[in-house]
Image: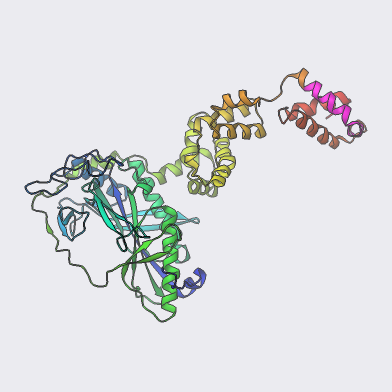
Amino acid sequence: MSSTETLMPYDEALERFEPVLGLETHVELGTESKMFCGCPTTFGAPPNTHVCPVCLALPGSLPVANAKAIESTIRIGLALNCSIAEWCRFARKNYFYPDMPKNYQISQYDEPLCTDGYLDVQVEGKTVRVEIERVHLEEDTGKSTHVGGATGRIQGADYSIVDYNRAGIPLVEIVTKPVEGTDRLAPEVARAYVTELREVLRSLGVSDVRMEEGSLRCDVNVSLMPRGSSEWGTRTETKNVNSLRSVERAVRGEIERQAAILADGGRIIQETRHFHEDTGATTSGRSKEEAQDYRYFPEPDLVPIAPDPAWVAQLKAELPELPSVRRARLQAEWGVSDLDMAAMHNAGAIELVEATVEAGAPAADARKWWMGELARRANESGTALADLPIRPGDVAKVTELVASGALNDKLARQVLEGVLAGEGTPEDVVEKRGLRIVNDEGELSAIIDQVLASNADAADKVRSGKVAAVGALVGGVMKASRGKADAGRARELILEKLGVQG
C-alpha cells in the first residue's frame, strides 16, 4: 500500500463487498537433516556452513528422500483430516531465484501426499470449517540478504549476499480451499486458522513453528466480490507474513485497499504483495496476471512414494491428543464457561494454567492469577504471557501460600512482582521482602491496641452497636501492618477487645 493509495473504512467495505480468503502456510519440519541430504538443519549457524554437494546442486550429486520428513507430512495430513495418497511422487518445479541453487525446486505438483482435509476454528463463539485442498512436501530455498537501500529489498540495494544453509530443509505447504462466508470476521478467521494450525503442528512435534524465525510463514490471498454476486474477484497474494497479528492485519488492510479501488471504478491487479510490519501496509511485488509456466515434470532421481496403508493406520492411531480435543477435556475438568475458555485460548494461557494445575494449584486459582495479575503485567510490558519470567510452578507455590494463610492476595501480587523482577522463588521473595502475613496473636494484638488508641471515635461507634464502623479499624490495622495482617482475624480481635458480638 503506497502512501498515495486510499482505503475504504472497514465497515463500509463489508457493506459493499464479500471477502474470499485463501491461506498457504509453509512449515519447516524439525528434522535433524535436510530433505535430500545429510546436512544439519540447525537455525542460526554461520552462513553457508550447513551445505554439501547435494543441497548446493553440484554436478553428479543425487538426492535421497528423508523418511522422517515423509512420516511427519503424513502425520500432519492425518491431523488435518486429509486423505493420504497410496502412491505419489516428487516433481521438479523450474524457475530461477538466486537463493535456489538447482534453478528448480523439488516439490509435488499434481500428486500431493495429502488431500481434501479440514480444520475447524472457533471465532466469536462460531465454528468455522476451513477446508484443506492439499498438504505437500518440498524443499526450502536459501536466503538472500539485500544490503544497502532503504527497504531491505533488492530494489535500491548496493549488493546481495546468499546464505544456502536453509536450502534443502524439508518444507510442508498446507493450502486451503477458498474460504467463503466469513464476512466481517474474515481477518479473525484467518488469524484463528493460523493459530490453530500452529497449535496442531506443535502438538505433533513436527516443527518448532517459530514464526519469527521463519519456520512457519503464511501467504495470505484475498479477493472481493460485490454483494449479491457469485463471481469471485481478482485475488492478491501477500507473501511471507510472519506473525499471527500480521495475518489479521494483512487481510483487513487488503479488504480496505481493494474495496477503495473497486468503488472508484478501478481493477485489482493479480500480484504478490509485501507486508510491512511497522505500518501494516502492503506494497506491490510482482505481477501474476500471466500464469508462469513452471514446466513441472516428475523428478527422475527419486522413486515414487507409496505409503503402506497399514503404516498410515498405525500413524493415525498414534496421533497425540489434538488441541481442540484437549481444550474440550480441560474445559470439562476445570468447569469453566465457553467464554472463559476462549479468553484463555486467546491469551495463550491454557498450557500455563494446565501446567500450574499439574504443579498442585486448584484450576480456579491458576486461572485467576494467569488471567488476572500476570495477564495485566504482560499487557503492560508488551510481552506474551508465556514469555513472562515466571514458571507455572512459581504460580502454584503462590496459590499454596495464599491457601495456607501465609499470604493474602495483596501480598501475593507483591510476591509475583518480585519473581518477575528476578528476585528468586516465591519463598525467596517472601523472605527478602518480609511479606508473610502477621499470624502471631501477640504481634497482631499490639498493632490493634495502637489502632484503637489512635481511632477512639471509631472504637466508640463500634461499642455503641455500629458494627459496620469496624471496617475503618480493620483498614487501620492493615495499613499499620503494611498489608501483612490477617484481616479476618484482626476483625475478630477488634470486636473481642471492644466487647462486641460479631
Front residue of 466/420: it is 420
Residue 399, picture quadrant: top right
Q: How many marks?
A: 0
The answer, for residue 362, to whether it is visible in the render is no
Please tell me which residue is depicted at 89% across the width and 34% down the height of the picture: 458
* Chief secondary structure of the magenta portion: helix
Residue 105 lies, in percent from the top left, at 18, 55
Would you place residue 81 above or below residue 396 in this image?
below
Quarter of the figure with the C terminus: top right
Residue 181 placement (x, y as % from top left): 41, 66
**What x and y, as percent, mark residue 25?**
32, 54
Residue 232 or residue 263, whichever sits in front: 263
Which residue reaches farthest left? 60
Residue 37 is left or right of residue 229, and the answer is left
Work out whether residue 459 or residue 364 is closer to the camera in this orientation and state it: 459
Magenta range is 444-461
State the image coordinates of residue 232 (x, y, percent, origin top left).
Answer: 34, 73
For residue 438, above or below residue 328: above
Which residue ends up furthest to the bottom in the rendered image?
265
- The quadrant of the picture occupied by the N terminus is bottom left
Q: Does residue 457 belong to the magenta stretch?
A: yes
Q: Tell me if residue 180 comes above or below residue 493 in the rendering.
A: below
* Rendered image coloring scheme: rainbow
Q: Is residue 151 visible?
A: yes
Q: Is residue 287 magenta?
A: no
